[in-house]
Image (cartoon, grey):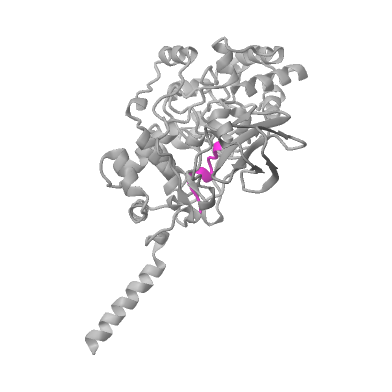
């Protein structure tokens, strides 16, 4: 009897332990009970359109892009799945993509992002584009990491962000049915460990390259700047090149050069000392990373603390808002007034127009960087991707849906916000259907085309 009683206590204790086990270790569900939807033929992640202008810059600065040699489509695909998987957080509520959203160039559109347990991030979430070819491999606003494999794991373990424990994370992924085949494809067997998680996430992040901006097309003699954009480029060259050198438009440097270049005069007294705290050296107080400005049009709010909501506010700060600081690098400009560059209204408009030529809409909309976890009702049984054209995209006043003859039949068009709110619904059987903007604000939307046999989602932009 005593033996039976002891066994009952052990079973009861085990059940209690399992009910209280952190991170829902047993049979963790996929994100919000979604289904993993990957293409039969993997997307190409291990190459990008390196323009001659980019190649000249990379060679001239001696930038190491050898991580591209180690990238595989299988590894980046695994990284994509992990990036969007909410099981990477302690309470299954958040993923990397919760703070780094594709439509905002993998930044966030709020000042501080939500972490687990109603906490918020300590700084604004940076964009992740174009890390492969930044001049120096330095990550985070305070430049505390020089290895991307380390940088991608830090938010997962940060208590105020995803709040994971590595052992719990590995156990959770091992219990998920989707991952053995993905790890085997990427690494040759189904072992799951922290190094492989970091490698896959890094490969996916490194693939986020903006190589189809208007700026790039102009430099390749495929397009021309407007007079306003030309004025902006001239002003940018005089005022901004020091910290945002083209065509990458970022400028990570060695610590010695960072000290020489100083901070950008945001404050006389910094509440957040940035690199000064990391190095425990007041000579570096107020110094933060100068990130790439590619896709800067969509990465608001700006600065390490997200204090500016628009590009116009940023330009105004450099025009009239500079603050004196012992480490300010703005003293480099000998003819600079104490408060800033004192741009005219026309010059301010030109600078903003030029900054908007850095936008690559492909990176913001292409499915290869999108969330692969989808509702069962949104899985395409028959692909319409090559049977439908959406033109123009980006659009200003209208979009046209062009149906291929092979699938021309009665169809429904639905326009949603990215949060899934249905905005408009149309029915047609015409070869061409035109959607008027009619007051829709600028932004990224989801367009769904439904036929009797299949349906397909597209990301579209009104600008």
Residue at image location 66% in from the left, 48% down from the top:
421
- Looking at the image, the residue that sits furthest to the bottom is 1
* Magenta stretch, main secondary structure class: loop
Q: Can residue 444 be seen at all in this image of the molecule? A: yes
Return the x and y of residue 285 as percentages of the image width and height: 52, 32
Return the x and y of residue 187 as percentages of the image width and height: 28, 39
* Magenta stretch: includes residue 338: no
Return the x and y of residue 92 as percentages of the image width and height: 47, 55
Residue at image location 41% in from the left, 68% down from the top:
20
State the image quarter where residue 29 is shown.
bottom left
Q: Which residues are magenta?
A: 93-102
**From what the image shows, is residue 322 above or below residue 454?**
above
Return the x and y of residue 451 as percentages of the image width and height: 59, 43
Q: Can residue 286 be seen at all in this image of the molecule? A: no
- On the picture, is 72 further left or further right than 256? left
Residue at image location 50% in from the left, 39% down from the top:
383
Residue 456 or residue 5, whichever sits in front: 456
State the image quarter where residue 462 is shown.
top right
Residue 339 or residue 178, whichever sits in front: 178
- On the picture, is 22 further left or further right than 461? left
Residue at image location 51% in from the left, 36% down from the top:
367
- On the picture, is 389 further left or further right than 75? right
């Amino acid at each position: 009897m005593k033996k039976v009683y002891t066994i009952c206590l052990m079973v009861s204790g085990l059940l209690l332990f399992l009910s209280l086990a952190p991170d829902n270790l047993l049979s963790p569900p996929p994100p919000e009970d979604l289904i993993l939807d990957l293409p039969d033929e993997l997307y190409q992640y291990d190459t990008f359109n390196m323009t001659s202008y980019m190649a000249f810059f990379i060679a001239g600065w001696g930038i190491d892009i050898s991580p591209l040699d180690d990238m595989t489509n299988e590894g980046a695909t695994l990284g994509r799945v992990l990036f969007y998987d909410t099981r990477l957080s302690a309470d299954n509520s958040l993923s990397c993509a919760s703070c780094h959203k594709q439509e905002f160039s993998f930044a966030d559109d709020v000042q501080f992002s939500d972490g687990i347990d109603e906490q918020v991030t300590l700084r604004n979430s940076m964009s992740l584009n174009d890390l492969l070819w930044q001049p120096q491999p330095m990550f985070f606003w305070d430049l505390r990491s020089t290895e991307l494999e380390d940088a991608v794991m830090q938010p997962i373990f940060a208590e105020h962000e995803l709040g994971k424990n590595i052992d719990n994370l590995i156990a959770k992924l091992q219990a998920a049915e989707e991952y053995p085949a993905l790890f085997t494809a990427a690494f040759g067997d189904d072992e799951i460990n922290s190094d492989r998680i970091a490698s896959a996430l890094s490969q996916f992040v490194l693939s986020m390259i903006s190589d189809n901006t208007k700026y790039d097309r102009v430099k390749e003699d495929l397009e021309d700047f407007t007079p306003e954009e030309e004025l902006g480029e001239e002003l940018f060259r005089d005022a901004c090149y020091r910290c945002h050198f083209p065509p990458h438009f970022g400028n990570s440097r060695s610590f010695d050069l960072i000290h020489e270049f100083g901070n950008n005069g945001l404050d006389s007294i910094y509440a957040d000392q940035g690199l000064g705290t990391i190095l425990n050296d007041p000579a570096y107080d107020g110094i933060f990373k100068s990130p790439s400005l590619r896709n800067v049009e969509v990465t608001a709010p700006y600065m390490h603390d997200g204090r500016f909501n628009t590009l116009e506010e940023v330009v105004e700060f450099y025009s009239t808002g500079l603050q004196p600081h012992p480490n300010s690098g703005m003293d480099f400009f000998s003819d600079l007034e104490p408060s800033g560059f004192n741009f005219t209204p026309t010059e301010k408009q030109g600078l903003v127009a030029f900054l908007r030529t850095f936008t690559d809409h492909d990176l913001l909309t292409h499915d290869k960087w999108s969330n692969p976890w989808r509702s069962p009702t949104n899985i395409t049984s028959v692909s319409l991707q090559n049977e439908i054209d959406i033109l123009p995209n980006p659009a200003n006043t209208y979009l046209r849906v062009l149906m291929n003859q092979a699938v021309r039949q009665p169809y429904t068009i639905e326009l949603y916000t990215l949060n899934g709110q249905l905005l408009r619904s149309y029915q047609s059987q015409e070869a061409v259907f035109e959607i008027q903007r009619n007051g829709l604000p600028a932004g990224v939307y989801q367009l769904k085309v439904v036929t009797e046999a299949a349906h397909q989602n597209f990301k579209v932009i009104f600008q």
